[in-house]
Amino acid sequence: MEDKIKLRKQIRHVIAETSDSELAANSEQICQHLARNANLLDRMKTIAVYAAHKNEVSLSKLHQLLPQHQLLYPLCHDAGRLSYHHIINPNTLIPGMMGILEPHQDNHPEFAVNSIDLFLCPGLAFTLGGHRLGQGGGYYDRILSQKNAASRVIGVCTQQQVLDEIPYELHDIKMGYLLTERGLQKVI
């Protein structure tokens, strides 16, 4: 656990050094790479995304690039639970837990986790083997442990966040793919 805390601090420092323009360019490339991947998206109708917080990769461009898909955003609840809600316009998101933009549960329909085809997950760091280092709350590990076996899970980050190894535990959910500004790749 101490190794994870130390690595989180190091990665946050590295990410903070990224300029806003570089992050915006990387975010644009990442969205374009996903949108061009017709083989993956062909069967995927519901996509769980997230609202970028601080220095995370922004996926907001996907609303323009993937108008035929339903984009679902997470809502944080007490006790570390996430629910996903359909959002047509990201401008309708409101500040929620920790200032992260979220759906208003009364205005946006909730989707059952097992009906989601594709999950795009933020993280502080990932490995080419699919391990993810999150912020430490366990929200994504809990929700992803409930998904159906047919759904895909993609870790989203910039290339500087891809490390050779990170500490992980048995309950940590592995990604099936990584998506960076260099493109989409299946984990090894």
Image (cartoon, helix red, strand yellow):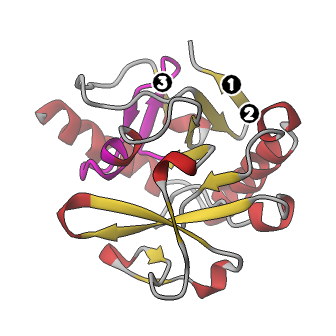
* Quadrant showing the C terminus: top right
x and y percentages locating residue 87 in the rendered image = 63, 74
* Residue segment shown in magenta: 122-142
Q: Which amino acid type is marked by label 3?
A: Gly
N-terminal of the two: label 3 or label 1? Answer: 3
Q: Which amino acid type is marked by label 1?
A: Gln
Mark number displayed over residue 182: 2
Q: Residue furthest left?
A: 2
Q: Residue at x 37, y 48 (%)?
A: 143
Q: Which is more foreground, mark 3 or mark 2?
A: 3
Any magenta on residue 140? yes
Q: Is residue 34 above or below residue 66?
A: above
Q: Is residue 166 above or below residue 53?
A: above
Per the model, the C-alpha gap separating discs 1 and 2 is 9 Å
Q: Is residue 55 above or below residue 37?
A: below
In-front residue for pair 160/65: 65
Q: Which amino acid type is marked by label 2?
A: Arg
x and y percentages locating residue 92 in the rendered image = 60, 87
Q: Is residue 164 above or below residue 124?
A: above
* Quadrant showing the N terminus: top left
x and y percentages locating residue 40 in the rendered image = 77, 34
For label 3, the SS is loop
